[in-house]
Structure formats: C-alpha cells, structure tokens
Image: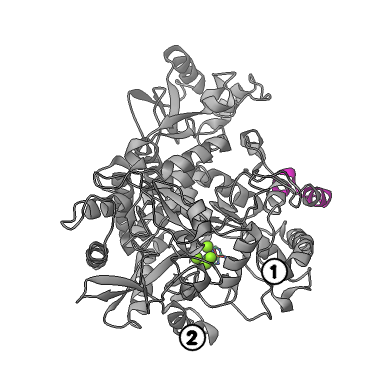
Amino acid sequence: MGLLEFDGEPLTWEKLKPYVEHVKTHGIQQFLHNYRRLMQRPGDILKWGDEVEYMIIKFDHTNRKVQLSLRGEELCEILQEKEKKKMKNLTSLWRPEYASYMVEGTPGVPYMGYMAQFNVVEANMKMRRKEVQELLNDDEQIVSLTVFPRLGCIDFTYPPHKITGPESNPVSRSLFFPDEAITSHPRFPLLTQNIRLRRGKKIAINIPIFKDTNTPSPFVENLNDPESKAAAKPDHIYMDCMGFGMGNSCLQLTFQACNVEEAKLLYDHLAPVCPIMLALSAASPLYKGYISDIDARWQVIAASVDDRTNEEMGNEPLKNNKHVIQKSRYDSIDSFLSSNSKIFNDINLEVDEEVKSTLLNAGIDDLLAQHIAHLWIRDPLTLFSKKIDLDDENEADHFENIQSTNWQSMRFKPPPPGSSIGWRVEFRVCEAQLTDFENAAFVVFIVLLTRVILTYKLDFLMPISKVDTNMEKSQKNNAILTEKFHFRKNVMTSQSPACCAQLCSFKSNCTEGSGKYLFNLSGVETVNHNLSECCSEMTIDTIINGKVCRGFNIYLSNTISVKTCLIIYKLTCFKLISLEKKLLYFGGEDEFPGFIPLIRRYLDSVEVGVEARCSISEYLNLIGKRASGEYMSAAQWIRHFVTSHPEYKHDSVVSDSIAYDLLVHCDQIEKG
Ligand code: ADP
Ligand code: MG
Ligand code: MG
Ligand code: MG
Ligand code: MG
C-alpha cells in the first residue's frame, strides 16, 4: 500500500451504498485493462520483502503497569519524512496501521533473489526497530508482539480514555476499545463504522476461555449493554469491535513471480503451507486480560471485520443480499488458481455470476475468473468523494478497494498500473514474533520454501476443504504438538528433476479421470487413488523435519534403470520419497521428505556465501526445533509465563502486574 492521501469526504455506509455497483463494475474494468496490458509481461525476477507490524508500549515501573502508547501516527509522520522527500535507497519504509499504537515497517527496497540477501533480513529488521526506538521516550518501547495481553481492559491505552457505554465510541460502539485508539486517517474509522453498519450490528468475537481451577463456571462477563449481553457466549472471552483483530500485529511476506503463471503456482502451493506456518508462529494466547484456549489470532481477526448481514450468514432468507456466504472476508483462501488445481477446489464457492461471465467473455481463464468473482461477492467498505469517477485504463483504486479488503491467507496481487512491479503473491498468516531473529527465521524459511517448490516442482495441492480443516486445527492450544494436519503424501511430481523423463513414459499407462488423481510418481503405480487419499494426517514435525522409517537409496546407472526401480517398488510397496540428480530414495508409506531436508538439499545445489549459510542454518534450526517441540512456540511460552507467575490465581486472569512482568520479560528477550 502506498502513502495514504486525503481524497475528499469519506462516505458512510448509507452514502456509499448507491455507489456499490459503480465501484464493483469499474473495479472489474480496471482489472481487465491492467490484465490485458500485463498478462504478457515477460520474465520479472524474484523480488521479495517482509512487513512487520509493531506496537508502542509504555511502562509505568512504579505501579507495575504497561499500556499501549497512542503515538503511532505521530511517529509515522517522522518515520516517513525521507520517503516524502523522495529520497532514494532508504533502509526502511513506514506505514500507519489500524491502531494508533501501531506502525508497520518494511525494507526500503525489496530484496532480490540471490542468496547473499539472506543475512540482510535480520539486520534490516534490527535497524527498523532501532529507528523507531530512537524516537521514543525512556519509558516507551517498540515491540513486535502479536496481541497486547490486556487489550480492551480499563486504561489499556496511554493516554487512557474512559468508556461509559457504547455511546462513548460512536465509530465502533465498543465497550472496551476507545475510538481514540483507531488511527485517525479517515480510512480506518470509516472501515470500522461501515463494517458495523453493513453488518447491521456490533462486531461479536467469542473466544473460548482457558478454564483453570479457579475460573468461574460458567464464566460470564458482566456487560452493561443489551447488544453485548445478547452477543456474548458463556465460557468465552467476548470482544466487540474491529480493534480486537486489526489492532493485532502480524508478519507478512510478498514475492514477485517471474510471470502470472508462476504467481498462480506460488499462490496455490503456499496455501496448504499457511496453516502449518500459523501453528508454528502462534504467539497469541491472551485476550482482553484473560487466558484463552487458542494460541493464534486468526479467528479473532476474521470475526473482527466480519461484515456479513443476517441474510448472508444464512440466519434469514435472502431478500436484500445476493448470497449466503460461508466465511468472513478475512479468512483462508477458497480456491486454487493454477491449471492442475481444479479437482482440489472442493468447497462451495459463492461467486458474482455477472462478474464471472464478464471476465470469461474477456478471455480470463476460468480459475482466475472464479477467484475474482468470488472476491467480488463483497461490497466496497470505504469510498471517498473525490475518488468516485476514475480513469479505468490508468487507475486501479476500485479494483484495489475490493481486492484489499478481502483479507485472505494468501493474496494474489496483480501489477499496479503504471509501475515496474510484476505479479506478486503475499503470504499473510504468520504471527509476529518477539525477536528480529525469529521474524527473520520465518521470513527466510518461507522464501527458501518458495525456491524449493519452484526448483523441484513440488506439488502441495490437496483438497482445499482439508486446508480449511487445518486452519481450524492450527489455532488450537499447543496445536504443534497435539494436532495432526492433512498434508499431501507425495510432493514429488513427474516434473521434479532427474530421471523424470524416463518415468514419464510409465505415466502413459494411467488415465486422469474424474475424481481420480494420478499425477505423481508413485501415483503411476497406484491407480484409482481418490482425492482424499492423496493426503494423510501428519504431525508438524513430520511436515517440517521429515520422517524416515526405513528405505533404500538407488543410484541410477546404466545397469539399474528406472524400470528396475519401479519393479522393486512394486514388489516392496515402497514409494519414491525423494530424488536428486540420479539418486532415488525409496521409503515406507508414511514417510515424508520434510521441508527442511528439502531446503537443505536445495542449498547444497546453489551458491550461498558462508555468512548467509550460517544464518540460514540457525533459522532452520529454530523452525525445526519449534516443529519437533524441542523449543516452545511464543504462544506456549507466554501461556507458561502467566500460569506459573507467583501472582496468578488460577482464575484465567492476566492482571496488570502479570502483564507488566510479561512485557518486561519480552523486552529483555528481544534485547538478548
Ligand atoms: P501491503 O500492505 O499491501 O501488503 P506493502 O507495500 O506494505 O503491501 O508491502 C509489500 C511488501 O512487498 C514489502 O515488504 C515490500 O518490500 C515488498 N515489495 C515491494 N515491491 C515488490 C516487488 N516488486 N516484488 C516483491 N515484493 C515487493
Ligand atoms: Mg503493508
Ligand atoms: Mg496492510
Ligand atoms: Mg499491515
Ligand atoms: Mg501486506
């Protein structure tokens, strides 16, 4: 997103409503102009960059209290000075975020593909943190914390704002989160208000509470607002506005693909990786001063911007709205895009039929048309009076309006008009980690994974319904160690390098029919695999670190041909687990190569400087040990810190002084 400008009067929902179709129709025209111009865009290079969202906290050491300091906007103004002066080669770029205690920082210029960049990531994150810290007062601290533990508790902001009832906050009508904590650029309050108005009632977020020995049962909050009372569920932590979700921090990554087809591939194959990385990066067990029974923020933020009406929720017959919609506009993706993916799109996909046929008639392929038509079931939520009539050939604001308020796990980003930027995909699920080291580890890990996927032509496709199931699992308390996740069994494809040409000849024996799935190497031998048999349930440890039970390597030579291997394979029921150059590894049915071993193998085949290799090694070590349980996730660590705090009363409450100690501790960890 570029710098935010002033574009005239913000239109509230009643004023915006007459323009809904205008924005949607022109948004599609803008997409088409752009697509026609850029479809043939030739070979862009890999570029990528991270986004880290930070919070500013303020310590009151005398009273052992910690608050969120509402200085984000003021700081952002200063942090953006160099950019506004159009200075080049900046170290960092800064954006305001939803809450006025937040700022978002990215590297000043995107990183390029080569490996030497890998040891710059962490250094750049450190510089960003320092840049902000230098502007802060002695009692303030910048933190990359996903959720502030006492968000929404009395006086959680500095300066504090008193709330007496929903009327204290005309924008959100929250009982807990002051409108003053929403960034004042009109986009943010407008989004907040219009989501609420479109929905027809206040936001309601109910998260199961972690029941400890002294937690009241049932756990019921005392709420003096009838709307809240009706919306709050017993044994749940109740939250009532957008700030509880969008006021949380995350870590995102954007990659530029070499062309539109590669962008689709990355989008598709990274989607099944999202729940795995969400679980691994989970960092948010505490909400509104209570311990919850979840470890990750995803469902909180999804509910925090859920603008669906009663009709769209399926609670009333459709009258004013067109669709019953399964998910919030903030949720995991609903369809794959690349050409082989069709059979895995197994969930009900609501689409705007008119948009779909416009796109199909314009020559857009059916999967992309379906994707855009699905995004287009949502209405625009913001509009500014000076930005209504636009030049569809050269502007994309209406397209971006709907695109950028479909907050999905992956985002497919077309090139903006009039720029040198190519087709990009964004990986959006990771929670912010406390330290730059950890954030860098996640970033580098995911970037390397994209290289492995593309180089080895790996196939992670699986029924998208199973990706959804995994998303649910990934947020559970201690999911890394207690849950098993659906993942594709055979990630090697017939296009994976080495010896494949020969193996391909065996493929001709097979048919690819409806509900049949026969693409991968071992699939060659196992005709009639149905869709769900393509994956099995694995631990995160297996997915990340791999699992080797028993097996054997075969080196292909003139005397041992692929044919021989396949005969062995047939006789022993072993499957091809991995291949590299001419070395084939056959293993047992539940073996899996693992992301890290694949990455290591990839690293052996490319040139990486010693320094970069060392950092990468440390990052892989962290991710690997998180996956195996040797290291705790941030969420588990925070949980453990609170429950073992001497002042904790086993009542699920995170008091001011516990939160203070936690954040003092977090700060010390960050400083090493
Ligand atoms: P948004 O908030 O819309 O996701 P931002 O502009 O805040 O987007 O961040 C996008 C990220 O993409 C940044 O990390 C930036 O460095 C990176 N980036 C910028 N240009 C490119 C490009 N051409 N290709 C890939 N990544 C890019
Ligand atoms: Mg951004
Ligand atoms: Mg953003
Ligand atoms: Mg952001
Ligand atoms: Mg982003």
Q: Main secondary structure of the magenta part?
A: helix
Residue 372 placement (x, y as % from top left): 70, 52
Give the quadrant of the C terminus. bottom left
Residue 204 placement (x, y as % from top left): 51, 55
Taking the magenta stretch, the answer to whether it contains residue 367 is: yes
The residue beneath circle 1 is 397
Q: Where are the magenta residues, as a range?
A: 356-369
Q: Secondary structure at mark 1?
A: helix
Which residue is at a point 37% across and 78% down the rendered structure image? 131
Q: Secondary structure at mark 2?
A: helix
Q: Which residue occupies the foreground of this view, 224 or 353? A: 224
Q: Given the image, on which type of amino acid does mark 1 rest?
A: Asp
Q: Is residue 561 visible?
A: yes
Which residue is at a point 66% across and 60% down the rendered structure image? 198
Q: Which residue occupies the foreground of this view, 327 or 538? A: 327
Left or right: residue 455 compared with residue 434: right
Residue 199 sits in quarter: bottom right
Q: List the single residue furthest toward the right.
A: 361
Q: Would you call the spot at circle 2 few (<14 residues within 10 Å), some (14-19), or many (20 or more)?
A: few
> What is the spatial separation of the Cα atoms under label 2 and label 1, in whole angstroms?
25 Å
Which residue is at a point 59% across and 58% down the rendered structure image? 201
Taking the magenta stretch, the answer to whether it contains residue 61 is: no
Residue 472 placement (x, y as % from top left): 47, 42
Which residue is at a point 60% across and 25% down the rendered structure image? 518
Residue 660 sits in quarter: bottom left
* First in residue order: circle 2 vs circle 1: 2
- The numbered mark at residue 450 is none
Give the mark toward the camera: 2 or 1: 1
The residue beneath circle 2 is 81
